[in-house]
Amino acid sequence: MAIIALLLLIAASFACSSESSDDGDFAVAESAGEPGIVVADELTSPRGLALNHNGHLLIAETGGGRLLEVTPYRDVRSLTEKRLPHALNTGPDEAYRAGPSAINILDGELYFLVGEFRGNQSARLYRLSDEPEYEPVTPATDAFSPTTNRFSNPYDLVAAPEVDGWIVSDPGGNSLVKVDMDGNIRDYVVFENFNIPDHEPPVEMVPTGISRGPDGAVYVGTLTGYPYPRGEAVVWRVEDLNGDGDAMDEGEVTAFATGLTTITDITFGPDGTLYIAEFSSDTKTIFDGGDFGDNAIANPGRVIRWDENEPTVIVESVVSPTGLLVNESTLYISEEYAGIVTERPLK
């Protein structure tokens, strides 16, 4: 299921001080409008990106139910013979796509998240294996599962030795959860709703992309719920300072980057620079009616480089960017509703 579903399902209508422009009017690099090079195309909702031990690009194809590897020769192959849990045209509007949304490697093993199945037992953390091709790490959950050991709508993950496993963003629960290697799920952070002028009810925070920062802390971007207010999305810095197994105490969650809009992913480059994907220039308009794909093209997103509170737009006019990856010289972007992954040289 695409990020569209996440946005629609969050139709819920701690303000923080901004360390940059409140309305997202950032400086724009001269090269921001240059087109990217297509690395993989004809995909169905590509999202999460990673690199394997060979340096090959890995793609979580949400709507296609596949984990893909891209070789240096641009050959694309599936890592499994069988399709992973996924669905097209689901939900009340038959507009949702569900499937693998994030991919990562820990101790040489490949893990992936399947999300967006609200109340469905496929919403789990999995590990690739020999026989069968993949196996669940977390238990099957549904509406009747204990709330202390279930996902709501897992989206992204980061390896977390501090919890002996993973920290996972769960936008359906407005939370980060910790998952140990035995599959136990517990709350790590729960985000509060916030108020904006002339709108009721409060807006949800909605955590999405998550990454490990150069200082060792976990960072997470927020989409924000309906009406997706401009300039209210935040990148939060999260750290368990007192070692009690969560980051719910005072001072453990702080705003790192503000003045942003509908963040779908974040990543850090090898030099510690933060990169942020904003889903659209006008997310609300995308859902006012008509075809989501056409609306996403008409209201594209962008990628921002955050240098010590001096944000710069380095890529413009990308269609629904939902996955970012940076190495020493290249920026990769999943353009979900364009069905492509593109690359651009870092400048």
Image: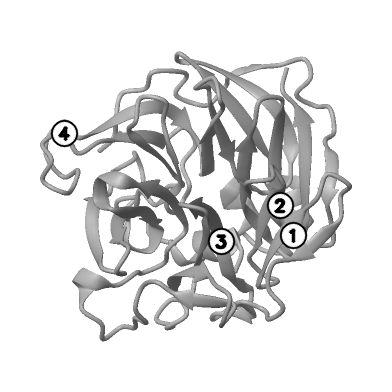
Sequence order check, earlier mark of 2 and 3 = 3
Q: Tell me the distance, in whole angstroms, between the alpha carbons under discs 2 and 3.
A: 19 Å
- Whether residue 201 appears in this view of the structure is no
Does 222 appear above or below 114? above
> Which of the 4 image quarters holds residue 255?
top left
Residue at mark 1 to residue at mark 4: CA–CA distance:
43 Å
Q: Nearer the viewer, residue 132 or 171?
A: 132
**Location of mark 1 (residue):** 293
Q: Name the residue under label 4.
A: 241
The answer to whether any part of residue 9 appears in the image is yes
Would you name the residue on which mark 2 appears?
Answer: 296
Q: Disc 3 versus disc 1: distance between alpha carbons?
A: 19 Å
Mark sitting on residue 252: none
Relative horizontal placement of residue 277, taking residue 251 as reference (left or right): right
Q: Which of 30 and 259 is in front in this view?
A: 30
Question: Separation of disc 2 and disc 4 at Cα?
Answer: 40 Å
21 with respect to 66 (left or right): left
Residue 279, horizontal then vertical, whole percent = 60, 45
Q: Position of residue 295 (x, y in %)?
A: 72, 54
**Residue drawn where x is 68% and y is 81% of the image:** 82
Question: Which amino acid does the dot numbered 2 rest on?
Answer: Ala
Local crowd at mark 4 within 10 Å, few (<14), some, or many (≥20)? some
Query: Tag 2: Cα neighbours inside 10 Å, few (<14), some, or many (≥20)?
Result: many
